[in-house]
Amino acid sequence: MRRTPWLSRLEGRFTLAAAAAGILPLLVVGAVAWYGLSRSYLNLAGARLESEVARLQGSLDGRLQALVGVLGQALDSPDGWAWALRFATARLPEVVEAQIRQNDGQVTVWSRFEVNPKPLPPLARAGVREVWGPVVRDDWGEPQLFLGLSSHEGRFLEARLRAPVLWDALVELHDPTLHAFLVDGSGRILASSNRLEVLRGVRAPAALLGAAEGGVFRYRDSAGVWRLAVTRSVPRLHGKLVVEAPLRLLLAPLRRSLLALVAVLLLAVLASFWPGWRLARSVTRPLDELARGAREMEQGRLRQPLVESGPPEARAAVRAFNRMAAELEQGRIELEEYAQHLEERVAERTEALRLARDRALEADRAKTRFLASVSHELRTPLANIKGFASTLLATDVTWKPEEAAEFLRIIESEADRMHRLVNELLEKARGERGEFSVMPQPQQPERWLRQLAPRLRRLVGERRLRLRVSEPLPCVSFDAERIRSVIVNLVENAAKYSPAGSTIELRIDPCPAGVRFAVYDEGPGVPGELSERVFEPFFRAESSTGGTGLGLAIARSIVRAHGGEIGIGREGGRTVVWFTLPKGDCDDA
């Protein structure tokens, strides 16, 4: 039958409308997929930026704190400020000029480039430990910082610092696509992962200066490029730390997905115009089903797979849609899991970095305390030995024999003190080199203790020493000289922290593992949270009266070398330090 022109035009328009109706769900699906993927990538990018800005802020704060700590040590030095200042500036290449003042005027001035430096303007204030001055730029455009420190003794320190102290923290970016910089209160860049920005005096965009701290936000720069950024304040420098990146680079991994999606849509457009009138009429119902599925996906997720119906082509389209929906759902789940795991890993790494930084700072403080303690411990007996020896050698005074003998006993005591200190240092050094060893021999603990008792009674001074031995005791194999040093160290500590006239008790009791040695005293004891740390090298509690902090650490090494254990605690209202030795390869007595 011959078709009229108007009927042909009607069939052609209906075919076009049917084809357009078939394309519409695919466009919706593609748009929803692209929107979901782009949002997920932006969320991940925001997490990366927050992680980087937190890490860089921690690194920057750590460097500034280390700088303040080193200069603070020079300021707090009891004497020799010029030497302390030169030593501190040698460790800090960022310091250009520095000076130490007292209330009555200048003490010492140091400069890296000038032979006769001029004093810096006063910046430190009494009662304020740390003051940061305004930022200035030299003739080359490089920013310089000013720092002022004060001490309780009325001394002040001013220092002029170069900007590399800030650059070194910002060039540690893990991701080369990110850009980090630090701005001052006026908006000029102090430090940047791109050094040219600092030398040119580039100003930060106004959108960054007015942004809220900590949140991820988007802004458009002067070139019209959209960027994603995170800001954090830096109170010490009165500025902000910014980490940013162009959205174009952050969404670069999605380009391949976008090209694949466009290719699929183009193929769908070409295929939709191929069928005729019957195809358009038969696929109406499957298209409605696809539209319903697209709406559900737009609302969040597809509750159930679409029903396959209609001609083979329509069923294939429904199957493809179901497959794509399942893949998108699986991808969404994987992205959520990845984001969750990524946050956990970032938190773990941040905590690990914080602990590592704390351990490094604690090690540095322990090293400083150790050097100061060793210097003091060596200087005191040397001064006493020299003083009494000079007194004995004086030709204008005639000393009585008992006075000369007393002076000699003091010199001998101080020499023994130096000998013990040197032995402690040597024992610690052997332990670190792995050369520490013991030579156990079968011993009777009660007989060995009786031989050691006279020396222990001399150590306690004005305190009473009580010895208690529970019998029968098994025979124990141990290095008599090593264990003697442990007992002497524990009794000395007990005498040091016990009041005069109190009783120090040394007990030896059998235990399942072998023999238990315990020293009881009436001193204040050690807080429970420090019961393990007192055995660490160089550790000393706040109430410590002196020493290097090596005695208990060496004692633990000796006891563990014998296969025993050592500990500290409270029993019956008294402080007790105990250690055990296992039974030896000898018959019980």
Image (cartoon, rainbow, N blue to C red):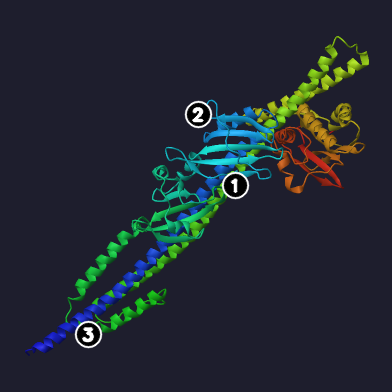
What residue is disc 2 on? 113
- Looking at the image, is mark 2 or mark 1 nearer the viewer? 2
What residue is disc 3 on? 281
SS at circle 1? helix
Q: 74 and 469: which one is in front? A: 74
> Quick check: 336 above or below 424?
below
**How many residues crowd mark 2 within 10 Å: few (<14), some (14–19), many (20+)?**
few
Is residue 568 in view? Answer: yes
- Looking at the image, is mark 3 or mark 2 nearer the viewer? 2
Horizontal side of 402 relative to 377 (left or right) equals right
Q: Are marks 1 and 3 in contact (CB under 8 Å)?
A: no
Q: 63 and 136: which one is in front? A: 136
- Looking at the image, is mark 1 or mark 3 nearer the viewer? 1
Give whichever of discs 2 and 1 has the lower sequence position: 2
Q: Which mark is residue 133?
A: none
Amino acid type, mark 2: Phe
Q: Are marks 3 and 2 in contact (CB under 8 Å)?
A: no
Residue positioned 16% across, 81% down in the render: 276
Horizontal side of 259 relative to 4 (left or right) equals right
Is residue 319 in view? Answer: no
Which residue is situated farthest in the top direction here? 395
Q: Residue 498: x and y, percent? A: 86, 38
What residue is disc 1 on? 355
> Quick check: 434 above or below 24?
above
SS at circle 2? loop
